[in-house]
Amino acid sequence: MQPLKITIPGNFWDCQIYRGRLYLWYMDGSVGVYNWNELLEKKFGEIIDPLILECAFTRGDYLYKSEVSKLLQDQDIKKVLYDKISKASEQELLINSDDLNGSEFSKQDNPAKELPTDICIYYNTLFSLTDSGIFSSSVHGQTKYGISTRSKKLWDCSLLSIQAYGNKLAMAGGEEGVFELHRGDYFGNLSNLEKIENGIYKISDHHSSFVNWSFASLYSSSYVDSGFLAAFGWNKNQDTEKWERNFKKIIPDSQIFEQSGFSWGSQEKIYLANCNTVEVVEYVQSLTDDNEANPFQHLASISLENIYGNIICGGISYFGVIIECEESLTVLCSDYSLCTFSEPVARWRVYPRSKRYENHLHVIYENKLVVYSFNHDYFIDQDQKNQGIKYKEINN
């Protein structure tokens, strides 16, 4: 099954999608905020089946829901839906500048003043990394602008990558290492970590190009050094009866895979690419402290014979594994199909931690943004797949 795609011509620097709004950072330093749901309804409401349009682009969680997934066990229903999605994927969908203007919520200067190195939106807050440091700005408020013009500087360290989870920010700082920033009460013991300043801790001084959450733990990837897992775990405080998150140890990828290569991970999956294969390991966080059990189970070796060029980045979502090479972007789909976009990529994003856009892959090329929607994963047994993280329903 091919992904559906929407092409948006323009000169974009970065993008985000959050709670029905599309955020576009332009090369001139401005940021446009657009009503995504309204935009799709206006442009495609009469040419795409409403259910498919919704599931593909505005409610990526819908077909994952337990009450709906039961219906997909009926082969007749499954076939009808599969055919509808496949038919929709054949259409050329285009959103031009006039379409964007018609659903514009606001257009403003970038509150962080500089084009960001990385961004994420979590709990109605935009976090922006720049050469000057990390900034936070409120979004989705009842204000004139989609992003609050009152940005707050959280730290003046120049960082490369950021991922939010709860009231914690995981940050990759290149040669400076990996850090966490806590924006509220922290339930746990961090006495074995270096405190940089109030609420900021150094997790490791190993080089880190980007970092991702692996449950309570962190997985750090590096373009110049080996990757590693910063293993955390949960322990029950006997005095308070509360579960607390505590740092355990650093586990290098050579120990996880017993070989070297470029590695990346998120949630229960960790991947390592060498010259011939991508090795897949499942991580069971609860076994980290078990001296008799191995928390890492080798699941599969995926051939790289159809992927050309040096691998320069990797990522994971529910629908598969994303591998960026010098001249292309490839998705190793969870149904074991291969989807390759043979065009140099400026930037790409997936949203596995969202509640609506789990099936999205946003790719910024030289003169356009393409929003790809992958929909095959609804038909996959989540407990059996090797290519992609397992979907677990989030209660709204």
Image: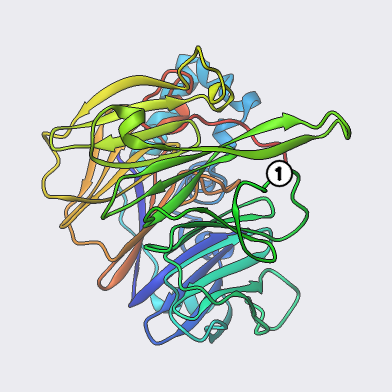
Query: Is residue 1 visible in this depiction of the protein?
Result: no
| Residue placed most toward the observer, 260 or 385 | 260
Secondary structure of the residue carrying numbered label 1: loop
Q: In which quarter of the image is the C terminus?
A: top right
User: With 148 as the anchor, is 107 left or right in this view?
Assistant: left
Number of marks: 1
Place of residue 104 in the rendered image (x, y in percent of width and height, measured from the top left)? 56, 77
Q: Residue at x 76, y 58 (%)?
A: 184
Q: In which quarter of the image is the N terminus?
A: top left
Q: In this view, does 21 lie above or below 280?
A: below
Residue at which label 1 appears: 189
Place of residue 271 in the rendered image (x, y in percent of width and height, measured from the top left)? 33, 35
Q: Is residue 69 above or below residue 121?
A: above
User: With 152 as the anchor, is 384 left or right in this view?
Assistant: left
Q: In this view, does 210 lie above or below 156?
A: above
Q: Is residue 97 above or below residue 36?
A: below
| Residue placed most toward the observer, 368 or 114 | 114
| Residue placed most toward the observer, 82 or 150 | 150
Place of residue 30 in the rendered image (x, y in percent of width and height, measured from the top left)? 47, 84
